Image: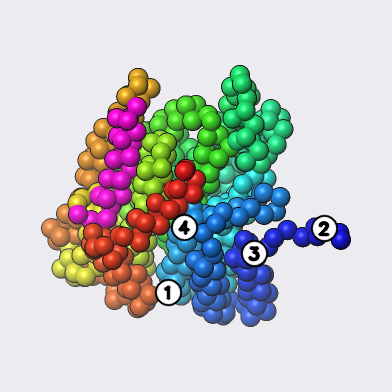
Amino acid sequence: MTETLLPDLAPAYGEIFMAIGAMALLMFGVFRGNKSTELVSLLTAAVMIVTLIITVTWNDTAVYTFENMFVVDRFTSFMKILVLVASALAVFMSMQYFKDEKEERFEYPILVLLATLGMMVMVSANDLMSLYMGLELQSLSLYVLASIRRDSELATEAGLKYFVLGALSSGILLFGSSLIYGFVGSTNFTVIGQTLSQASHGPDIGVIIGMVLVLAGLAFKISAVPFHMWTPDVYQGAPTPVTAFFAVAPKVAALALLVRVLYVPFGEMSESWTQVIVFMSLASMVLGSVAAVVQTNIKRLMAYSSIGHIGFALVGIAAGSQDGLRGLVIYMAIYLVMNVGTFACILAMRRKDGMVEDISDLAGLAQTRPAMAAALGIFMLSLAGIPPLAGFWGKWYVFKAVIATAVADPMATNYGLIMLAVIGVMASVVGAYYYLNIIKVMFFNEPEGEFILQKSRKLKAIMGVSAALMLLFLLPQINAPVLEYARMAAAALIS
């Protein structure tokens, strides 16, 4: 009996369904034109929801397929759930915006769907080739999304900067991958990990350099310092719904990929990559906190805020423990809700002459739109890490994990982990200034003018639900499932 050449497709049913859905919606949009934008958006969200159901119902065992290039386990499942939720919400948030701007394009939701497909592949990548395939599918879609407003100079500039710097980072990642392949003889994560663990003389210098270059390429995708330079300009220049999408889903996917790259193929080299992660974490937290202080545009402020929050998330990786990874997963779940809610408020900042983005335009918002001011205030306090809101607990779990690692093994090399936690707390205090400044402007300044009433019920629902989740995170009914699933996700990578 001949052995079949077909791989097991079951672990990739979600990705296959998304790819088929994207092609079908593309053909539908081509024949119906831009008048079908709203319907295509709803169908795109429906495809994501079905994929989410497929992901949730997958069994808990780790399964490898496509010659061990693709893996599905509890960690990948949870991170895919976050990516799909963020992407679906981004589609819902964009519908009223493009209608009000009279710039409806059916390509937008399809590009979001294709980018999300790339993220799904990234999260499940177990090989340098599948890593690159998912990364480029995501990146090429994001380049177009950044400049989707062809008549806007800011959007065109944002797309061009993102493309040029993204191509550079991809080249760095590819060069690192080629070095790893040359010295190890394989691109598969599992094989690389086994080879390095069996090496009696330690890793070759070429593998170390290759690993650092791969980390540099991935650091660009998560906006970690010193590879953050594209973020403020792209966030400001891209349409606000695109910025909302950029701020959440790609970060979750790239962080999930970074975690797997560090723990699976390079787990034996933790002493080498921990130094890199600690540096990026420190630099991101400090720069994100300090540079945002002088920003007057709220989208640029959120860009530096995202850089700072990536620094906090990297603290969980630097811990190098199961608790650290658990803290990272919890942090990203909370980060998703905080940012989606914040950008829903920014999308509601519309006057008769169009969108407004300056922080000064929020003056007196509590008097003209008290519900919106209350929601945005909750998000700002949560982003600042003020207890008892959810943002505080996200930071609590990652700092607790890194301190536990340092205390458990009080060697000289772990002194840096204590300093990482101390500087992280100080950066969080500095960052609280600009979040509290927005609250001050909303509640204590004289009104600059009233925003028009928000028509989109979807946007109102997203703001309300997100604010409620930030307030009620301490309830066991809300945090218990997140904490338990985060524990299982971390255990899937670190036993």
Seen from this angle, which residue lies furthest right? 1
Quarter in which the N terminus is drawn: bottom right
Q: Where does the magenta region start and end?
A: 388-409
The answer to whether residue 93 shows anywhere in this view is yes
C-alpha separation, residue under disc 4 versus residue under disc 3: 17 Å
Asked if the residue under mark 3 is in contact with the one under mark 2, i.e. CB atoms within 8 Å, the reply is no
Element marked by disc 1: helix
C-alpha separation, residue under disc 4 versus residue under disc 1: 29 Å
C-alpha separation, residue under disc 4 versus residue under disc 2: 34 Å
Residue occupied by mark 2: 3
Asked if the residue under mark 3 is in contact with the one under mark 4, i.e. CB atoms within 8 Å, the reply is no
68 vs 197: above or below: below
Task: Give the mark nearest the N terminus, 4 or 2.
Answer: 2
Residue 400 covered by magenta stretch = yes
Measured as percent of width and height from the top left, residue 409 is found at 34, 27
Assign the magenta stretch its main secondary structure.
Answer: helix
Task: Give the mark nearest the N terminus, 1 or 2.
Answer: 2
Seen from this angle, which residue lies furthest front? 1
| Residue 10: numbered disc | 3
| Residue 78: numbered disc | 4
Q: Nearer the viewer, residue 422 or 175?
A: 422
Measured as percent of width and height from the top left, residue 492 is found at 49, 49
